[in-house]
Image (cartoon, helix red, strand yellow):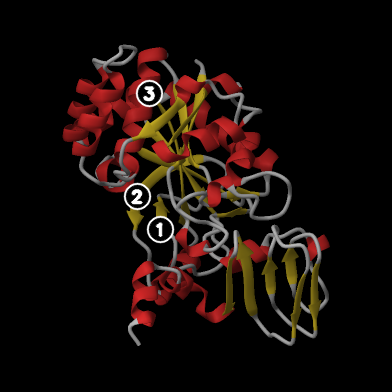
């Protein structure tokens, strides 16, 4: 059976302002200074498993031109523009109904566009094993990440057994825990980070959506009637926004008893904060005081534990700071203690600007 890869690329990445903005969010940025954007790196890791003409990207209508520019090998008809964001369940359903119309027996991998995977060969092996499983068994396989710390920012997958690199049954999905709960998960050994990567046969996911998210499935049936006709764009714009705004986890994963997981240590990160980006910047851009940099001419003097990201600046000088983030992009600048990085989204908002103006 042919493998298709669906890349979800509609997020806005507001926690990484000013590098990531609604006009060009983090999946379309070279966050690590390695010459490839996050979505390009995502395609790179799947190319050993899937021909480029069998990739699909679901994104906002406003990002279609960026996708075409960065991924010219993907057929234009495989770049699917959501009229509005309705979370991952409608996004995935739309792509899978399109694939079903083109290849009714396809095996599908669904992945976010903006995560990092360092262990590329191991990742390819894990996905290959999951794909083999979906051919012979009508189950959904999720990819779990072996946790390295009691992380409170990720959802967790509880597996039946403490087994790595093999497909095992999922007991249940867990929402983002508090620290004490995350510590018990880490100690238990059968809880894995939910990477949001799913592997299934197209027939399986369509039947699961019909069983657990019937409203979405019925809307997709109506949209599918217009596939390949002049009415497709108008029909999509009319019906897609009527889908409930719900994640695939809530819509299907937490309801179905047909879910398995394959867990592994893949060097995975969602790069959802400046600290996580900093920790993955190549070693050549790191000094002995724990400072890291991304940019052409960044001069860090008398600093410790700082991260300076200023690719579009000629020369940047930073002196005398400890544990600070300094990031610049398109004329915008943030200078913020690392301990306050979760507040950057708030500080960069229009509401905060108005609040400051009123003082």
Instruction: Give neighbour class at mark 1: few <14, some 14-19, many 20+ (Cα, 10 Å).
Output: some
**Residue annotated with mark 3:** 202
Tell me which corner region of the image, top left, top right, bottom left or bottom right, holds residue 298. Answer: bottom right
Instruction: Look at discs 2 and 1 and give the one toward the viewer.
Output: 1
Whether residue 116 is situated above or below residue 240 in the rendered picture: below
The span from disc 3 to disc 1 (Cα, nearest Å) is 25 Å
Indicate which disc, 3 or 1, sits on the residue closer to the N terminus.
Answer: 1
Q: Measured from the top left, where is residue 309 in percent x and y?
A: 67, 65
Q: Measured from the top left, where is residue 159 in percent x and y?
A: 42, 50
Whether residue 359 is situated above or below residue 48 in the rendered picture: below
The span from disc 3 to disc 2 (Cα, nearest Å) is 23 Å
Q: Nearer the viewer, residue 13 or 170?
A: 13
Q: Nearer the viewer, residue 154 or 128?
A: 154
Q: Measured from the top left, where is residue 161 in percent x and y?
A: 45, 50
Q: Measured from the top left, where is residue 147 in percent x and y?
A: 54, 60
**Residue annotated with mark 2:** 171
Tell me which corner region of the image, top left, top right, bottom left or bottom right, holds residue 208. Answer: top left
Instruction: Look at discs 3 and 2 and give the one toward the viewer.
Output: 3
The span from disc 2 to disc 1 (Cα, nearest Å) is 14 Å
Q: Nearer the viewer, residue 300 or 164?
A: 300
Where disc 2 sits, the SS reads strand
Question: What is the number of the mark on residue 155?
Answer: 1
Left or right for 242, reference 7? left
């Amino acid at each position: 059976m042919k493998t298709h890869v669906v890349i979800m690329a509609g997020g806005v990445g507001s926690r990484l302002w000013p590098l990531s903005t609604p006009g060009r969010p983090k999946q379309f940025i070279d966050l690590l200074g390695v010459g490839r954007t996050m979505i390009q790196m995502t395609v790179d890791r799947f190319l050993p498993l899937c021909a480029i003409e069998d990739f699909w990207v679901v994104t906002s209508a406003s990002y279609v031109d960026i996708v075409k520019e960065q991924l010219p090998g993907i057929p234009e008809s495989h770049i699917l523009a959501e009229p509005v964001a309705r979370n991952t369940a409608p996004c995935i359903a739309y792509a899978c109904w399109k694939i079903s119309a083109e290849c009714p027996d396809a095996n599908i991998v669904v992945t976010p566009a903006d995560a990092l995977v360092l262990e590329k060969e191991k990742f390819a092996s894990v996905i290959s094993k999951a794909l083999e499983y979906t051919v012979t068994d009508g189950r959904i396989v999720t990819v779990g990440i072996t946790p390295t710390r009691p992380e409170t920012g990720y959802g967790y997958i509880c597996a039946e057994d403490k087994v790595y690199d093999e497909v095992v049954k999922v007991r249940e999905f867990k929402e983002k825990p508090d620290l004490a709960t995350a510590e018990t998960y880490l100690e238990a050994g059968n809880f894995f980070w939910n990477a949001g990567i799913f592997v299934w046969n197209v027939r399986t996911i369509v039947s699961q959506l019909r069983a657990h998210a019937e409203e979405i499935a019925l809307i997709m049936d109506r949209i599918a009637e217009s596939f390949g006709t002049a009415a497709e764009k108008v029909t999509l714009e009319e019906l897609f926004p009527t889908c409930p705004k719900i994640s695939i986890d809530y819509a299907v994963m937490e309801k179905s008893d047909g879910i398995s997981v394959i867990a592994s240590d893949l060097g995975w990160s969602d790069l959802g904060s400046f600290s996580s980006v900093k920790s993955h910047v190549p070693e050549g851009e790191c000094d002995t005081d724990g400072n890291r940099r991304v940019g052409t001419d960044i001069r860090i003097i008398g600093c410790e534990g700082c991260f300076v990201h200023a690719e579009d600046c000629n020369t940047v000088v930073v002196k005398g700071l400890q544990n600070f983030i300094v990031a610049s992009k398109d004329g915008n600048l943030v200078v913020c203690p690392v301990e306050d990085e979760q507040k950057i989204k708030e500080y960069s908002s229009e509401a905060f600007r108005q609040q400051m103006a009123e003082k």
